């Protein structure tokens, strides 16, 4: 019999599911209290199985929040102009406050052209240049901020008791949807921010300096215990699907969870960490967009 003591993780495991449920609950209560009916339209082009699941989940969550939920399905060979026409109709529809076009799009459609066609006040993904610019200059109060970075900031705030000023935050990944907006949001909270990416020299040494370490890469278990400063808050945005020799699939993050748990003070799991927060923040963004429309301001 193995009598070795079981090593228990030292880090607090940040419960993204509970945090997301609380946000969704607040949104639902606000909808009831304010007598407002936010409208969320999700456009799906084609029938990618993962996208279909994401779109269905968003619709179900929107309905659970008391929103008007609309799904528009276009065939995989729908033209770019057809999609732009649908976006134009949704822009003009007063019952719709949030428009989300599910990515990835078929290769014959230019995603940037589609993003730019969405009215920035309805751009609940926060990808339009106007919202990107507002976030970059720190005007987050009037922006629609991308959902995943927004959710990450909520989790960081919770794990660090809101004391972020002066902390060194290292973001691994520089994508437009996660890494870059996150770096801007952390700067706005007066963190010292380092962005590490695929061409960075000695990522490990830079990450080891982080009080707050966020991995948004898409490489399973990239971040090892040796990358983490003792006591750091570690947020794992990565979602990687692994299939073992027997064909069993599992989801893992970018962080080697077990070994990093022994070093960090707090860590998000995958699944159950950042993932649920993304959809919760989409609900929050749609409510915010509806409130602004009601007030006739941004
Ligand atoms: P992306 O592919 O657009 O960007 C990945 C970034 O990682 C790039 O900037 C690249 O420079 C950097 N990178 C690649 N290899 C690296 C390395 N070895 N060291 C350091 N940096 C490296 O990806 P993305 O869209 O930002 O998504 C990142 C991960 O987050 C993916 O696993 C994705 O599935 C996941 N994701 C999760 C959510 C969620 O809701 N939890 C939302 C969006 C993305």
Image (cartoon, rainbow, N blue to C red):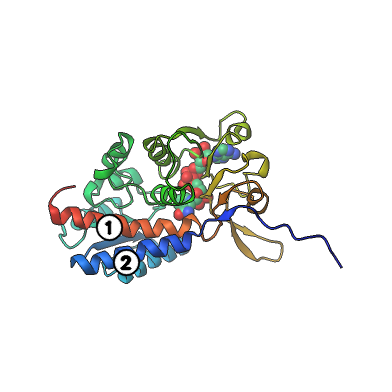
Q: Nearer the viewer, residue 179 or 4?
A: 4
On screen, residue 282 above or below 175: below
Quadrant hosting residue 91: bottom left
Q: Which residue is mark 2?
A: 62
Q: Nearer the viewer, residue 79 or 208?
A: 208
Counting residues from the N terminus, which is met first, the one under dot 1 or under dot 2? Answer: 2
Q: Which residue is mark 1?
A: 286
Q: Is mark 2 within 8 Å of ligand 1?
A: no
- 93 vs 81, left or right, is left
* Name of the residue lying farthest toward the left: 296
- The answer, for residue 86, to whether it is visible in the render is no
Image location of residue 136, percent across then percent down = 33, 35
Q: CA distance from mark 1 to mark 2?
A: 9 Å
Image location of residue 26, percent across then percent down = 32, 63
- The answer, for residue 60, to whether it is visible in the render is yes
Residue pictured at 60% horizontal, 48% vertical = 255
Give the SS element for disc 2.
helix
- 230 vs 44, left or right, is right
Q: In the rendered picture of this protein, how many numbered marks are placed on residues?
A: 2
Q: Quadrant of the N terminus?
A: bottom right
The local crowd at label 1, few if under 14, some if 14 to 19, many if 20 or more residues have their Cα within 10 Å, is: many
Q: Is mark 1 within 8 Å of ligand 1?
A: no
Q: Nearer the viewer, residue 23 or 11?
A: 11
Image location of residue 30, percent across then percent down = 25, 64
Residue pictured at 38% horizontal, 40% vertical = 185
Give the SS element for disc 1.
helix
Q: Nearer the viewer, residue 110 or 160?
A: 160
* Name of the residue lying farthest toward the top: 201
Image marks 1 and 2: residues in contact by CB distance under 8 Å: yes
* Name of the residue lying farthest toward the right: 1
Image location of residue 202, percent across then percent down = 62, 30
Quadrant hosting residue 269: bottom right
């Amino acid at each position: 019999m193995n009598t070795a003591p079981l090593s228990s993780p030292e880090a607090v495991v940040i419960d993204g599911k509970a945090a997301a449920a609380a946000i969704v609950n607040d949104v639902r209560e606000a909808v009831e209290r304010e007598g407002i009916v936010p409208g969320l339209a999700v456009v799906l082009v084609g029938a990618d199985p993962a996208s279909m699941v994401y779109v269905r989940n968003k619709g179900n969550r929107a309905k659970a929040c008391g929103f008007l939920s609309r799904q528009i399905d276009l065939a995989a060979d729908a033209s770019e102009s057809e999609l732009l026409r649908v976006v134009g109709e949704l822009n003009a529809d007063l019952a719709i406050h949030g428009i989300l076009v599910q990515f990835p799009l078929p290769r014959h459609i230019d995603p940037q052209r589609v993003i730019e066609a969405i009215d920035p006040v309805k751009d609940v993904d926060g990808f339009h240049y106007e919202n990107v610019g507002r976030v970059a200059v720190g005007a987050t109060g009037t922006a629609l901020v991308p959902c995943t970075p927004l959710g990450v900031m909520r989790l960081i705030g919770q794990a660090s008791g809101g004391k972020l000023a002066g902390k060194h935050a290292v973001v691994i990944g520089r994508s437009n949807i996660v890494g870059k907006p996150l770096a801007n949001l952390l700067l706005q909270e007066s963190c010292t921010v380092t962005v590490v990416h695929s061409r960075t020299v000695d990522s490990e040494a830079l990450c080891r300096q982080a009080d707050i370490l966020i991995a948004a890469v898409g490489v399973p278990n990239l971040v090892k215990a040796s990358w983490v400063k003792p006591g750091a808050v570690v947020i794992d945005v990565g979602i990687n699907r692994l299939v073992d020799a027997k064909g069993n699939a599992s989801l893992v993050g970018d962080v080697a969870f077990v070994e990093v748990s022994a070093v960090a003070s707090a860590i998000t799991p995958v699944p159950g960490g950042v993932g649920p927060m993304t959809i919760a923040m989409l609900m929050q963004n749609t409510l915010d967009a509806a409130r602004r429309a009601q007030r006739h301001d941004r």
